[in-house]
Every structure is written in C-alpha cells, then in structure tokens.
Amino acid sequence: MVAAPFFGYLGDRYNRKIILGAGIFFWSVVTLGTSFISESYHWMFFLSRGLVGIGTASYSTVAPTIIADQFDEGKRTTMLSVFYICIPVGSGLGYVLASSMANVTGDWHWAFRVTPCLGGIALVLLIKLVPHKIQRRTEAHRALSISGTIRVAAEKPGVQRSAKTTWWQDVISLAKNCSFVWSSLGLTAMAFVTGALGMWVPMFLYRAQVVQGTVSPCIEKSCNSSNSLIFGGITIGTGILGVVAGAEAARRLRKINNRADPLICATSMFVSALCLFIALMMAQRSITSTFIFIAFGELFLSVNWAVVTDILLYVVTPRRQSTAIALQILVSHLLGDAGSPYLVGTISSVIQANNNHSVQWSFRSLQYSFIICVFVGVIGGGFFLLTSFYVEDDRKEAEKR
C-alpha cells in the first residue's frame, strides 16, 4: 500500500519490464524465506509478510498500463478481464493450496513454498513473452488516444507534445478528476467487503454450523474444517464468472449508453450487498443457503474488477495512468481491506464481551458485525452512481490531452 505511489511514479517514467520483473523476484524470494522462519521469530514472520506488498505494488501499478498500451478499447476490456480473473483465482488458490499443503505435509510452513514456484514461472514468462516495444513508455505511448490507437503528436502540425510533469502535479490533476475520485472510493468499498469476507467467512460458517449442531465445538488451537476449501473454490469460480460477465456486459451496454461502466458497477454493488445480507440472515437456519448467497455476493463483487480499471484508463491521460492506479491502490487498501478484517473482528469481540459467553452469542457477534459490510457495499454503489454523472466529461477531457 505504501510502496504503490513510488512504483506508480516509476511506471510512468522508466522501464516497466524491469519494474515488473524486480517486483516478482522480490516477492517470490521473501515468500520463500518466510517458510523457514520458526515460531520463536514471529516478528520476522510478520515483517516478511508485509514486505511481500512491495513486490505486489510493483506489478499491480504497471501491468494494467501495459495492457492499455497494447489493445484498443473494445479488446482492452476483454484483456483486462483476463488479467483481473487472476485476483479471485489467486485468492481462492491461496485457501486451497495452503490448506492442502499443510494437511499433506503436516507443517504449515509448506504453504509458503508453493507460491514462489508460481512466481518463478511468471518471471520466466515475463522475460520471454513481454515484447521489447513496451519496456519503456515513449512519447508515442504518452500520446495514446482513448481508443487505444497510437497518435504521434510530431506527425500532426500544430499539435504540441505532452509535457513532462512532476509527481505532485499529477496528483493534483487526479484529485480534480471526479470520475477517478468517485470510482476509487467505490473500489475502496469493494476492497473493504472483500477483505472482511476473506478473513472471517470460514470462521462465520464454522460458528453457524456449531449453532445448527452439524459440527462439534472445537477447543483445539487448530481445527480441521472444509470451510476454507469450499470458500476458496467459491472464490475461484465466482471470480472467473464475475470478471468475464462484467467485461461482456460493459462491452455490450456501452454501445447504447456512455455511462454503462459505472452503472454496471453500481448495480453489482447493490445486488452484492443484498445477497450478503440474505446470507447472514440465513446462516443460522441453512448452511447450504448461506453458501449459495455468499457465492452470489462474491460473484457480483467480481463483476467490477476489470470495469473499474477500464474506467480509470479512459478518464485519465496515459502519462498519469500508473500514478493513478498507484493512488487507487493506496486509497483502496488504506481505507478498505487493510482495516476491515480488524474492524469486523473488533466489533464482534465487543458484542460478545457484552453478552453471555455462549455458542449462540459467539455466532451472533460475528453475524452482527458483518452487517457493516452490507452498509459499505451500498455506499460503494452510491459512489459508482456519482461516477456516472461525471464519466462522459472526464473521458472527453482525457481525449483532448
């Protein structure tokens, strides 16, 4: 989160292939090193987990701009959907692979030795397949029009090349871009809900099963449960379907409505919030219904991943896109998933402390605290509705530059 603005600055000015490769290498090495840290050095474990974010920031801020440079508007949305499918797939595989490796080996350290192998594969593919022409953003790239076609200013009489600006000037310009600001706040609401669900849903499902009497209360430090595996599978499946559906809906609807993208995001946030609310209310009665509505909630959340980035890419001038993505990452993590798991857990603990220490209140405390995610989801939908009021004007302004 903290490193994102730094890499956004670099991504708009220097060799992006090197930035991507360095980030993947750093992230993989730190993750592998984590697997050799013993419990007695727990402070090093937390430190290494935090350092992974530095590697993540490098390619999260740069990779979407490479896609924007290579494809025109229609195909760009499709390619972004392919890219953003990796978010839910990677998140879901984290649950599945980590849980499986820990069970097979009997040692949780092995969970951190799988992902560095995938990082190594990604690094090799980056070196072999990413073309040389996008390693550095040239003046031609900076003159990229919103349709995705290269427009070389020098070839057009009377057209002045884009001037270089400082990072602070870029930030001020982005702060005046209403579509960027409101869509970033909408993404922050998405991150808030996603972070809380990722941390607490397996525990919530387990407590619901205890209340229903389908499983026995676990008093051990580590309890075997299939909830993490099931939730991981749901995250993967709904992530793929949601991203693909969102990209396809955007591609079709923007032909008849120039505001289709933010309206799709707003609608999906409202429907997701409704599904999560129903899942919370059904948990005590039917665990199957809870799984179903959680799946629908995640499905509609995933609809927005590629669409939100596409909005950014056409309302922000190309020479500021990496910086814009970096600031969006900073805000969405800072106000979103960096704190939402802690907030939900804290509210649950306060509710439980003020009531009887029973199985029933253990479940209800987490159920009630999850309601905040429903409210945040509705607020996020409102932010995307506000985006729809400004998106056309901001898009035209970006085209002029």
Image (cartoon, grey):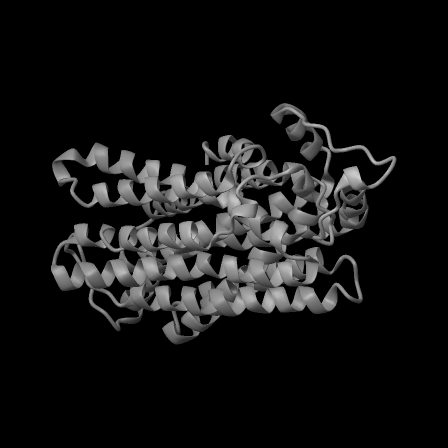
Single out the residue that lies furthest toward the right: 158
Instruction: From the viewer's perspective, tell me whether residue 56 is left or right of residue 169.
Output: left
Q: Is residue 169 above or below residue 263?
A: above
Residue 341 in picture, x, y percent from top left: 40, 46
Residue 64 in picture, x, y percent from top left: 56, 49
Specify the quadrant of the image occupied by residue 121: bottom left
Instruction: Determine the residue positioned at 37% across, 50% down.
Output: 123
Which of 198 and 289 lies nearest the eye of the viewer?
198
How many numbered marks does the figure carry? 0
Which of 87 and 298 lies nearest the eye of the viewer?
87
Instruction: Determine the residue positioned at 27% across, 54% down.
Output: 117
Residue 57 in picture, x, y percent from top left: 45, 40
Instruction: From the viewer's perspective, tell me whether residue 245 is left or right of residue 196.
Output: right
Residue 301 in picture, x, y percent from top left: 54, 60
Which of 217 and 53 lies nearest the eye of the viewer?
53
**Is residue 211 visible in the rendered structure shown here?**
no
Quarter placement of the C terminus: top right
Instruction: Determine the residue positioned at 55% across, 31% down.
Output: 9
**Is residue 164 visible in the rendered structure shown here?**
yes
Instruction: From the viewer's perspective, tell me whether residue 270 is left or right of residue 213.
Output: right
Specify the quadrant of the image occupied by residue 316: top right
Instruction: Determine the residue positioned at 28% across, 40% down.
Output: 30
